Amino acid sequence: MRKLLASSVTAVALMLVGLLFEAAVAAAPLSPLQPVLAPGAGPAGPFAWLARVLGVASVHGNALVGLSLAALVLSAAAFLRLLQVGWRGEVSLRLVLGLAVGANLAILFLPLLASRDVYSYIGYGNIISLHHMNPYVQTPADFPRDAVALLVGPKWLGTPAVYGPAFSSLSGIVTRIITGVAGQVAAFRVLAVGASLGTIALIASSARRVRPELAAFAVAAFGLNPVVLFQSVASGHNDLLVALAVAAAFAFMLRGRELPAVAVLTLGALMKATGGIPLLLLLVWCVARRPAGERARAAAGRIGLAAAIALGFAVPFFQLHDPTLGMVELAGHQGWLAPSRLLARLGEAVGGGAVAGAVRVIFATVLLAAIVVLARHVALPAAAPAGRDHGAPELGAGWGWSLLLLMLLGPVLLPWYVVWGLPLVWLLPRVPRWVLLGVSTALAVSQFAAEPDRYPHAYNANILVGHYVIAPLVTLALVLLLLDGVRRLRAGAGLRAADGG
């Protein structure tokens, strides 16, 4: 008992040290972890004080970059140690919940971190609320006098919105109510914190219902994950709204409430298209598990509900210039950490553009095939046994598989994408579970220099590490995931973890 207590105390203490150290580095003046900040939004508060006390605030140049990398590695290692303790049931849910809630709220005392995407949110919101135009046609570059135009990332300045119409509407509301870029950034970060806290509460509730011995692990995997805290919550990313929708839909399904689950997942998909895949699996589940004579009515009710919600948000933005509302634009982007880009670059080096194009087609085909396989599985009567949880854990595991495969097979991979599937990671079998957690840990250390102009050499090194270290590791993880999926398919195994893990 003493050994178990010492193990949990050590893990919790290490987690606290890692989070505080990363927060102190993030709050240092001109920290490599900060993007360009809005006027009046510089570091302040308790973590700026901590940076001064620790001497981090007086470190500059490459030494500060080194501290940035060290902080990322320490918090990632501490996170993995806490997960080991949580998996063995050596730490209480109450303690982990307290740490997770405190850590998420503490993020509000840090400046914006990791990404400039929130400035794009504001730019698209301004197009709606200030200029009364369509963000799927106009771009932030069309309004150079907007205060936020100078802050939007160069790659996205001339890009129309690639987010769902529900999120575009939300962006318009935020920019209509709140004036000033700093205040608008704060508003999106408060939304992100709220979404993260809501997701944590839902994870805790669902895990206690299904596998109470894993509840602490489930909460820690999301709520204390450095990539969630420092690269998702701290940057105000809308991916957290998708995570909230997934967690809420799963909680509804545990109680057999299909219509609310369809509604909330539809809203998640209208925030970001990512939510569309679990929504598709949910609709297949709702229809296929009914007797043949009831399927048409079930399909009409649930598909009709999703379509009505989608139309309500999409109609105000519909036009013929881009009737897909950003989906075609999004499909043309590639990310520097994505396995598809790595293998396409290798294919191009070996056989030219035709080979690179073939690689991209293969990735898209594998993703489509995986979705079909998952849909067929959730349609099996055996996937929906009767019981207190209404068979929802198998469906939730299917969502986890689908979101993990989408993340790794898609053309863009960014750290905040891991939040899509993390609310369900505790449902997954061993290989996909540790692939998701391993990738999240690798991505947590993938951005030790956020801005090319501030630390150009460090930023270039960051890119090289991403290309030649992290991307190959993520690609290896994808291969392991696919092999395990094929093995489970041949063995007729389910999608979720057995009670033994």
Image (spheres, grey):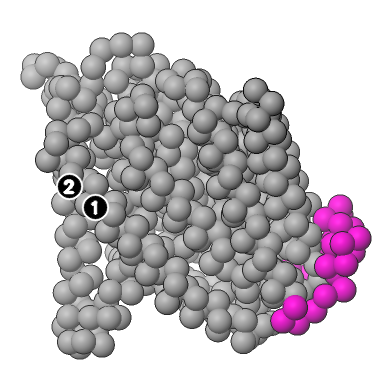
**In x, y percent, where is residue 351?**
17, 87
- Disc 2 marks a residue whose amino acid type is Val
- Disc 1 marks a residue whose amino acid type is Leu
Considering the numbered disc 1 on the image, is that residue within a helix, a strand or a loop?
helix
In which quarter of the view is residue 121 placed? bottom right
For the residues bearing labels 1 and 2, Cβ distance under 8 angstroms: yes
**In x, y percent, where is residue 32?**
69, 73
Q: Who is closer to the viewer here, 414 or 182?
A: 414
Image height check: is 352 above or below 313?
Answer: below
According to the picture, the residue beneath numbered tag 1 turns out to be 482
The span shown in magenta is 38-63
User: Is 51 part of what is drawn in magenta?
Assistant: yes
Residue at (48, 54) in percent of width and height: 440
- Is 443 displayed left or right of 321 in the figure? right
How many neighbours does mark 2 have within 10 angstroms: few (below 14), some (14-19), or many (20 or more)? few
Distance from the alpha carbon under mark 1 to that under mark 2: 6 Å
- Is residue 50 visible to us here? yes
According to the picture, the residue beneath numbered tag 2 turns out to be 486
- Is 209 displayed left or right of 145 in the figure? left
Residue at (68, 46) in percent of width and height: 15
Looking at the rendered structure, the number of numbered marks drawn on it comes to 2
Residue at (24, 85) in percent of width and height: 348
